[in-house]
Image (cartoon, rainbow, N blue to C red):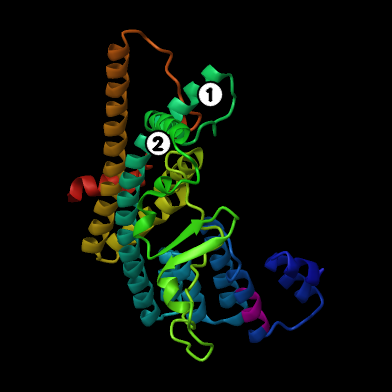
Amino acid sequence: GKRASRACGDWRTYFACCAEDEEIIGFDQSTAVAESISSKVANMCEQRKNYASAATILLEYAEDVSYAMDMFISAHLWGEGRRVAHLHKRSDLVKKVVDGSVSYARICIEDLAERASTFEKSLGRYAEVIVIRREAIREAEEAGINDLHHDDTASMFSMQSTASNTSLRSNASGRSIGSVGSVGSVASVSTVISVGAASTFSFTGEVDNMKHKSKFNKIGRDKKKKKKQRKKGSARMKPGSEEELKELVTTLGHTCPDDHYVDVISETITFLLQTDKQSMATLLFESYKELESAVALSQTTRLGRDQEEREKKERKEEHLNEFIEHPCEKDINAISCRPLSSAVEITFSFLL
């Protein structure tokens, strides 16, 4: 029925049911349905379909060409928007669509540059963390532990932590835990707490000045130290941990545009060329190619350096160890930017 179809977003069935019930669909009703569909939160591909559906409803039921054009622009359906604008002889809306495509191209150019920077930075850190995680896996296997999270930080600081622990044990054995000498630089602090034999505390230092103050002398008494409030969930991530690696993998996986985004960029470049906006089309094309090159070069450089480091380590140890690979490595090594549409690539092979 109408209620069920509208609830699930099946606007075609909804309007068909309204027609069968001989219900007159007014401007306000059709506009409300269109806005309800376009406001649904979804991924980029689904959102585009929602905007396109909203534009169709506004055209066919509300007969609101201007509002429909806004939906076409939001959907990045430049060609369809221009066609409908010409159909209704609205040159002003044709210009609006063209201007919308130029604005979107500028947004894409900035986004692609940010993606290139993010990928290079994240991949550089990934190259460091993956070595740490491989070592952690090797240590876990030697210890008979099947856990990727094993020894999240010790593999990074194993030599330093071992030396520190040894030093601490030797110092502890030669000193009394309660001795003043073990406090070190605490003597420089203005207030010192000394422990008496009867488990009572005597205060020396600035607190002495407050011993004989009357209740009417409030100097120094009303000063309250502000306690630093720790934000919930603000625990720092351990450097080199499996958690950091997962975050890097997620970032790298989302840096390269997905198939839908690449298609939209290709369509935008094509539309800009068709509407005499060649300079903007060229900028967008070059921005995407720069991202594509940055990803490919970063990957090639990292993999080459990683291979060299492994070979150097094998020569140093004078024996061939079985190479340990983290489960995420194949996916990361396969990351690359999908080429733009063949039509765009061929067109710019003649233009540039």
What secondary structure do most residues of the magenta stretch adopt?
helix
Q: Secondary structure at mark 1?
A: helix
Q: Report the span colored magenta.
A: 29-34
Q: Is residue 87 visible?
A: yes
Residue 54 numbered mark, or none = none
Q: Nearer the viewer, residue 351 or 288?
A: 288
Kindly identify which residue carries mark 2: 129
Element marked by disc 2: helix
Residue type beneath disc 2:
Val
Which label was assigned to residue 140? 1
Residue 312 against residue 71 in the figure, above or below:
above
| Among the 4 quarters of the image, the one containing residue 275 | bottom left
Q: Position of residue 108 (x, y in %)?
A: 34, 60
Task: Establish if 86 lies above or below 173.
Answer: below
Give how far across and how far down residue 10 sits, in percent: 70, 64
Name the residue rendered at 58%, 60% in the picture.
200
Ranked by sequence position, the earlier of labels 2 and 1 is 2
Which residue shows up at 68% across the image and 82% down it?
A: 29
Q: Quadrant of residue 15?
A: bottom right
For the N terminus, the image quarter is bottom right
Kindly give the residue lying farthest to the front in the view shown. 197
Residue at the bottom extreme of this rendering: 216
User: Could you say which is closer to the camera, residue 70 or residue 134?
Assistant: 134
Q: How many other residues sit within 10 Å of disc 2, few (<14), some (14-19) or many (≥20)?
A: many
Gap between marks 2 and 1, in whole Å?
16 Å
